[in-house]
Image: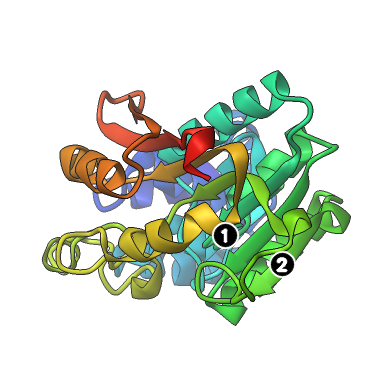
Amino acid sequence: MNAGEYLKKHKDILEDLDAQILLAHVMGHSRTWLLTHPETLLTPPQLDEAEKAFTQLQAGTPLPYIIGHWEFFGLDLDITKDVLIPRPETELLVEKAITWLKASPERRTVADIGTGSGAIATALAMHMPDANITATDISFAALKVAKHNARKFHVHHRINFLQCDLLPQHVDPLPTDSHFDLICANLPYIPTETLQQLPIFGREPTLALDGGADGLDVYRRLFEIAPDWLAPGGMMLFEIEATLGVRALSLAFDHFSNASIHLHQDLAGNDRLLEIIPASESY
């Protein structure tokens, strides 16, 4: 059976794009190559692998987990079921971070809290070669994936990976050289009840998705400790769930009363990114 015939066989049960990406992966080529070489015959091992992969996809396993990699900010990141699948909405955070860092050449220390696959940290390291980045995650398995991706793109020497809950415990006062100019986070932010009704529930790690009753539990904890870690004049960027914009703003103003706080929308027009720049006098 050739590739074109195999795709037609699955046309009624799988989306064309997913089927094409999956079969191209099995054949060791790009989707573009597959579409221009539909007459290529599948070998018996390829047919076996394709059947197993297509069965997984039909059963609900997300495509990126089956093929083991996914694109984010122009980078082909390797992923496992221990981390969230990188999503285009998070690219807004990276874009804002790069813009701010380029406009502030004296600020080069960055924290990526809840790094997961290392998508944010690796993308920032690739685009800001003089940045010094600390990436944290409570999950040791996730940190292994993040470290792998940093090595894959040869930026591991500029990222310090730490296993901890949000930020490391520290003595008071925090040493000056431990402050961060920029704190970024894409933390669990889906309300528990909402999450349990979504297709991703049970298919991506709940630890990285469940934000508690209102979706803001983890951010409440981070807002309590983040000011101690932020350098004067620094900035914080937090990705939020699309329906939590007003509540996230209210929570931010409660914790940072004198700060400059802005809510940014993603390309779909949804509330997505919280930007916080505390007033210098508040330190």
Per the image, label 2 sits on a secondary structure element best described as strand
Query: Is 230 or 56 nearer to us in this picture?
Result: 230
Is 164 placed above or below 259 here? below
Q: Residue at x 79, y 41 (%)?
A: 131
Instruction: Kindly give the residue lying farthest to the top in the view shown.
Output: 103
Query: Is 37 or 217 nearer to us in this picture?
Result: 217
Residue 24: percent from left, percent from top: 59, 47
Asked if marks 2 and 1 touch (Cβ < 8 Å), the reply is: yes
Q: Amino acid at mark 2?
A: Phe
Q: Quadrant of residue 17?
A: top left
Residue 195: percent from left, percent from top: 19, 64
Query: Is 145 or 36 nearer to us in this picture?
Result: 145
Q: Quadrant of residue 242?
A: top left
Q: Residue at x 55, y 58 (%)?
A: 228
User: How would you rate the neighbour count of disc 1 (Cα within 10 Å): few for under 14, some for 14-19, many for 20 or more?
Assistant: many
User: How would you rate the neighbour count of disc 2 (Cα within 10 Å): few for under 14, some for 14-19, many for 20 or more?
Assistant: many
Instruction: Kindly give the residue lying farthest to the front in the view shown.
Output: 281
Residue 1 showing in the rendered view: no
Residue 10: percent from left, percent from top: 34, 52
Per the image, label 1 sits on a secondary structure element best described as loop
93 on left or right of 152:
left
Is 1 placed above or below 139 here? above
Is 263 placed above or below 238 here? above
The residue that disc 1 covers is 115
Residue 220 showing in the rendered view: yes
